[in-house]
Image (tube, grey):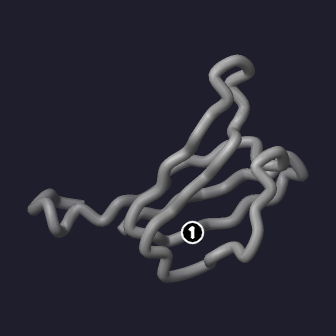
Amino acid sequence: MVTLRVFLKSGQSFDIRAEGGSCGYNTLTGELKSFKYEGAVADIPIYLNPTQVEAIVQVHKDDEEEGLLK
């Protein structure tokens, strides 16, 4: 499980707990065009407008399944 923090241009942010996530970018402008997450279990947004997203960062990853220490 990972925690993905989404920062909006309005200054607000929220977290999504999911199995994983990926972003798609416009190759000319570098702007975010899509955001996909899989296996979300908490704080699931109903709708997210990619044009209003400033940044998406991974803030936590559970490494137990890989045998790594936290």
Amino acid under disc 1: Ile
- Image quadrant containing the C terminus: bottom left
Q: 64 or 42, which is in the foreground?
A: 42
- Residue 19 on image: x %, y %: 38, 68
The residue sitting at 76% across, 49% down in the picture is: 50
- Residue 35 on image: x %, y %: 61, 52
Can you tell which quarter of the image residue 61 is in?
bottom left
The residue sitting at 16% across, 67% down in the picture is: 65
Binning the other alpha carbons within 10 Å of mark 1 as few (below 14), some (14 to 19) or many (20 upward) gives many
Q: Given the current orientation, which residue lies at the most extreme bottom position?
A: 41
- Residue 3 on image: x %, y %: 48, 64
Q: 19 or 26, which is in the foreground?
A: 26
Question: What residue would you read off at disc 1?
Answer: 16
- Image quadrant containing the N terminus: bottom left
The residue sitting at 62% across, 78% down in the picture is: 43
In this view, 54 is above or below 21: above
Can you tell which quarter of the image residue 55 is in?
top right
The residue sitting at 60% across, 57% down in the picture is: 5
